[in-house]
Amino acid sequence: MLGLPAHTEINRPLPKKAIFDKFEVKSSQRERFDADISRLTLVNFLSTATIPSLQECDSISSIYVVEVLLKRRDFDEKNLLLISKLIPQKLIFALSFEGETCPVVFHNKLLIGDWQTEPHLTLSGLTLETIWDNLVRQIGGLDADINQSLDEQIQEADVRQKKFKQLETLEKRLRTEKQTRRRLEIYNEIQKLKHEIYG
């Protein structure tokens, strides 16, 4: 799955009931979970056992890829956050719905990739820590910028995304505003924001 090496495949079902029972999930969370998710399967296991060329790493011992078979495409992100919280492992989710797959990862926040028929992730790095950072960057659409840490890149992407949303809101307001003075104020705000975003 996700173009990862065949020797990392494990294909083990991860029963929802077992998760609910082990972690004593609230009934409201169960209902929300059941409304979105049909089945969970551990599909890949990345570690020094499955990739012997990797160097040992203290911070990360393994990475799991979990296939999440969805009942609907407009899923509730809280379900993935719940799994990330309950299972203390590095997890990459491969959301599947009607022949398309979307990679998702949680690293301080949920990063959602693009829906594709055959998404492909590249493993790059000599340790699992480096591989994890690069996978997060690929899924989140971040640059492999060595001058910034992964956390800094995610934070910067968040700020940029908020500015794009703010710009979209201002442009809608500009189209509907009737007063000339107020239109000019909104226009100036838009120009200032565009300068911040594009430089």
Image (spheres, helix red, strand yellow):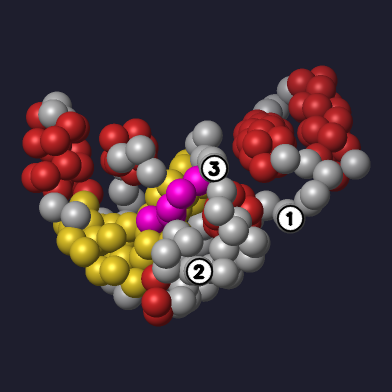
Vertical relation: 81 (above or below) 135: above
Within 10 Å of the Cα at label 1, are there few (<14), some (14-19), or many (20+) other Cα atoms? some
Q: Position of residue 102 (x, y in %)?
A: 43, 62
Number of numbered discs: 3
Q: Residue 156 is drawn in which quadrant?
A: top right
In this view of the protein, can residue 198 be seen by the observer?
Answer: yes
In this view of the protein, can residue 140 be seen by the observer?
Answer: no
Image disc number at residue 58? 3
Image disc number at residue 52? 2
**Cα distance in 3D space between marks 2 and 1:** 25 Å
- Image side of residue 12 versus residue 196, left or right: left
Nearer to the camera, 156 or 198: 156
Image disc number at residue 162? none
Give the mark nearest the N terminus, 2 or 3: 2
Q: Residue 92 is drawn in which quadrant?
A: bottom left
Report which residue position mark 1 lands on.
144
Nearer to the camera, 122 or 34: 122
Q: Residue at x 80, y 49 (%)?
A: 146
Q: Amino acid at mark 2?
A: Pro
Vertical relation: 46 (above or below) 105: below
Q: Residue at x 80, y 27 (%)?
A: 189
Which SS does the magenta portion mostly show?
loop
**Cα distance in 3D space between marks 2 and 3:** 16 Å
Q: Amino acid at mark 1?
A: Ala
Quarter in which the N terminus is drawn: bottom left
Q: Secondary structure at mark 2?
A: loop
